[in-house]
Amino acid sequence: MAPEFDLIRRHFTWPVTMAGTLGVGDDCALFLPPAGRQVAVSTDLLVEGRHFFPDVDPRALGHKSLAVNLSDLAAMGAQPAGCVLGLALPDIDHDWLAAFAAGFRALSERANCPLLGGDTTRSLSGRTISVTIFGYVDPAQALRRDAARPGDDLWVSGRLGAAHAALQVMLEKWSVPADAPVPDWRQALEHPEPQLALGGRLAGLAHAAIDISDGLAQDLGHILVASACGARIDCTLLPAADGLQMLDEVQRLEALLGGGDVYQLCFTAAPGQRDAILQAAVAADTQVTRIGVIEPQTGLRLIDAQGRIVADGFAGFDHFRA
Amino acid sequence: MAPEFDLIRRHFTWPVTMAGTLGVGDDCALFLPPAGRQVAVSTDLLVEGRHFFPDVDPRALGHKSLAVNLSDLAAMGAQPAGCVLGLALPDIDHDWLAAFAAGFRALSERANCPLLGGDTTRSLSGRTISVTIFGYVDPAQALRRDAARPGDDLWVSGRLGAAHAALQVMLEKWSVPADAPVPDWRQALEHPEPQLALGGRLAGLAHAAIDISDGLAQDLGHILVASACGARIDCTLLPAADGLQMLDEVQRLEALLGGGDVYQLCFTAAPGQRDAILQAAVAADTQVTRIGVIEPQTGLRLIDAQGRIVADGFAGFDHFRA
């Protein structure tokens, strides 16, 4: 393999102009947090064949590798400070690297999240991508999973289910009618948009938050366990992606409640903040929907159009897991 | 695979008691840098079959995964703040995970570098380990690669060549006499000790520094290129690990100049700092050796016992690369 140094230099080095920041090229990168701010940090591994298809568009993969980490910052109410990238590659394909880097860089620049350093190495099989991201947050405003309170409204941003539906169709597990207009579900799967603007505005306003990477039911479950409370969701209120109505009811609920790779925010807030939250969503140019309520009784209760509980407790929707 | 959450919880969660720090279990970990300090960050990927043998002792591997990253902090003169861990594993072997975690934790606690978060996933082939580390450094004292100046002394810490010799013997490329006392080279390969205490004391005292992960000649080369100068090394001064005298001269020089995985520091400092540097080494309970000098003329010149230049420029020792 060519010297690792050269791969990072050639494909992943672009000007970093933040004050107090030293980018690619030394033993460590350096950045200078604003006084009194906490540093938020998150790390994700993406493995070929598990998190992405071998033939995925490398530009989209570069985007997504950074997007899923930015989504963790958004869920904490943090603003980006920078990131580092590790790449294990079976070979050196400069066209692939250039396209991956272009997708990564475009989002990095748009999100003001400079790439500060990296490590590349040869893998013996497929590609593995490791991104670690840093952000800043006011310690009093961080959106923690353990901060939900009984009586809170339960909200989600955006619309749900498209990424899951796209994956099921690509895996040929689900089919759509041949004469139906094909919705652009795949865009949601391959090009998720992290909700940084909304997360930043929710900091200090909402109580608990999480990003929906593993499915609404499972990720909300983490909030409920950490906060020692429960929730009730009105399934008729779940905001569905375009085209999900062509699925049958079981598939539709699976996509909405169990579908991962969404990277929207699920959050809780006091009912007195409803107007402020709707205004935050307008300012962030996104949609938020109130889907239920936090309750003292642990567990998750799903309510259908007739007001009946269709699933009670976490066990009831385990089969929805993607 | 069992939920990723549980693997991190079960094997990699131990109490974190630093003020302002939130560890494993939320979208992001949080830590609060001291006012005015820069955050230093470094990331490394370790790939099975490339950076470690599949049957390596998992406890030693846990130690080394963190040690190589701590060494990057040491080379920057930074003190540890915390780290995050990514693991891609072909299966869940709780005995292996427990031993890996024990090695990681022992060094984490000794170095005061808490594990703040992680991500685990199933790989389709061997194990891949990703560690990203953070530290704090006074912006005026960071040991940068571009800070060497002509006239500086050139120093290395510790002794060189053991890890490379161990690897060559394990790969059956080199043999040692059957009747020779076998030196404990393998300890150097599998259990490197990062030079944090020395690095911290060199901050503000030395000029440039780098850790020797890829071999002295190659890593020093990064300092020389970044600093736009050259160096002269007196090969008779290179501090050799025990037992290297049983090798022939070519093997010995290859181990000393080209051998990687050393994790000692190579650094430059003004001649007026010699006493201070020797005192820093005593305080850090380690050895430092002055091996040469930084010169205005670019390139690296290796001088033998007769004062002759045995290799001139970087091309001259490319074959030493491990």
Image: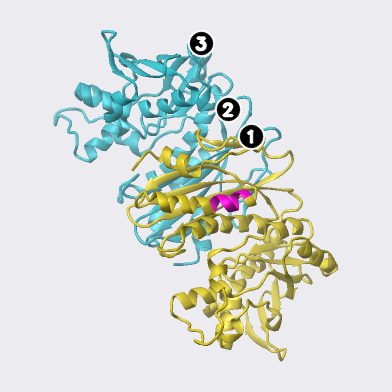
Chain colours: A yellow, B cyan
Task: Give the residue furthest to the bottom.
Answer: A306
**Structural distance between the alpha carbons of marks 3 and 1:** 28 Å
Query: Residue B59: where, in percent of width, then height?
Result: 39, 47
Mainly helix, strand or loop, the magenta region? helix
**Structural distance between the alpha carbons of marks 2 and 1:** 9 Å
Say which mark, if any, is on residue B142.
2
Answer with the quarter of the image where residue A236 lies: bottom right
Q: Nearer the viewer, residue B178 or A276?
A: A276
A274 in magenta: no
Query: Residue B264: where, in percent of width, then height?
Result: 42, 28
Tell me, yes or no, whether the two marked residues, 2 and 1, touch with CB atoms within 8 Å.
yes
| Residue numbers of the magenta segment | A104-109
Chain of residue at mark 2: B
> Residue placed at 58% from the left, 52% from the top?
A106
Judged left or right of residue A303, residue B129 is: left
Residue neighbourhood size for the residue with mark 3, other residues' Cα within 10 Å, grouped as few (<14), some (14–19), many (≥20): few
Answer with the quarter of the image where residue B83 lies: top right
Position of residue A165 relative to residue B317, above or below, is below
